[in-house]
Image: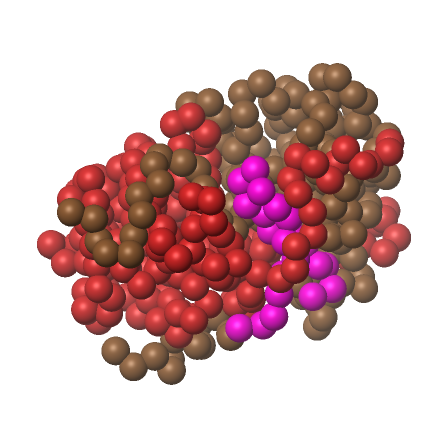
Chain colours: A brown, B red
Amino acid sequence: MMTPGKVAIGTKNLFMPSPVTLVGANVNGKPNFLTVAWCSIVNNFPPMVSISLYRIRHTRAGIKENGTFSVNIPSSRQVEVTDYCGIFSGKNVDKSRVFDCFYGKLKSAPMIVSCPMNMECSLHSTHSIGTHDLYIGNIVEIYVDEDCLTDGMPDIRRIDPMVCTWKGNYWLIGEFVAKTFDAGKRYKP
Amino acid sequence: MMTPGKVAIGTKNLFMPSPVTLVGANVNGKPNFLTVAWCSIVNNFPPMVSISLYRIRHTRAGIKENGTFSVNIPSSRQVEVTDYCGIFSGKNVDKSRVFDCFYGKLKSAPMIVSCPMNMECSLHSTHSIGTHDLYIGNIVEIYVDEDCLTDGMPDIRRIDPMVCTWKGNYWLIGEFVAKTFDAGKRYKP
């Protein structure tokens, strides 16, 4: 018997909200970037991030070739170019000139100058799942635009990242709700 | 040489924004819930979700015991109880009475009635990474509050989920920016 008020909508991947990132890798020596929403921190010490990529994705060859990739956080001002990188594959269009790039410690993970936050990653492991492969990377360095830091830490209001829903919309970050590891102290069981 | 305007802030797990979820499992036959921000869709067909849990987490025993878990999306009205579940461990406090629960197809993954969206999962695989273990689950069903659906699909404005930053704040979802797989058509390379 269904719980009153609840509707079962099937086995869909309708998680929300998902972060909006641009994942970069050098494919045949040229930077390529792909829009990725299926991205998460997965380990604390050392810090690691995961990205899930459809098996036909062009970027995968570059990650395999170099053992490196980048996760770039675009600001909402970059929504059109961000979405462009998700619609058009590097197999068909040359995305190497879309962004000005810079390189860090690893020398082979292209990062986007105009994105306010950039995570430089070395490949830790690859896990074949189904239609997608999960790539886990060690975060070897994070770069942030100087004017997006507050007390040396990345400031979400200045970075102005987006979240999205699956085959849906991009959304801004809204109002402050509460502090983490703090609001719960006011809860009375 | 550093790229002008960029500041290297080290190897941190400062990804943003992260979704806010409550992961549930029955531990020794009693529902337990844990706040999880390191959560992402990882596969399309079949739909799968990943959660990353610190190795000492109480909830892990329940996932192992039953091979099932739930991912619940709280609304911003639930911020205090959501944060509470992240501060206090099921090892020390009994969280089984915090929420009214319901069960679905799997019979052993407790889901939170008051959360507007619930994902019922069967364990697909576990990956030991470092301080954390990654649990990948098949999404066997999604339940949504009837009044949070628009045309049969979960409506982010009605569900009113939150995002967070690491050791930072909870934030609301803000204004609409653009449609996915659409805004990029207006970008001119």
Tell which of B168 and B143 is nearer to you.
B143
Residue sitting farthest toward the front: B151
Question: Is B1 positioned to the left or the right of A73 in the image?
Answer: right
Question: Residue B150: where, in percent of width, then height?
Answer: 47, 49
Question: Residue B107: where, in percent of width, then height?
Answer: 15, 44
Question: Is A49 positioned to the left or the right of A34 in the image?
Answer: left
Quarter of the image holding residue B127?
top left
Q: Eyeballing the image, is A174 above or below B72? A: below
Quarter of the image holding residue A159?
bottom right
Residue located 46% across and 22% down the image:
A131
Question: Is A18 positioned to the left or the right of A1 in the image?
Answer: right
Question: Residue A138: where, in percent of width, then height?
Answer: 56, 41
Question: Residue B40: where, in percent of width, then height?
Answer: 47, 44
Instruction: Say if residue A41 shows up in the picture.
Output: no
Instruction: Look at the image and give the residue range highlighted in magenta.
Output: A157-177
Instruction: Say if residue B41 shows up in the picture.
Output: yes
Question: Magenta stretch containing residue A143, yes or no?
Answer: no
Residue located 39% across and 69% down the image:
B78
Tell which of B33 and A43 is nearer to you.
B33
Q: Eyeballing the image, is A132 above or below A44? A: above
Residue located 77% across and 41% down the image:
A80
Tell which of B46 and B87 is nearer to you.
B46
Residue located 72% across and 26% down the image:
A88
Question: Magenta stretch containing residue A164, yes or no?
Answer: yes
Residue sitting farthest toward the left: B29
Question: Is B44 positioned to the left or the right of A88 in the image?
Answer: left
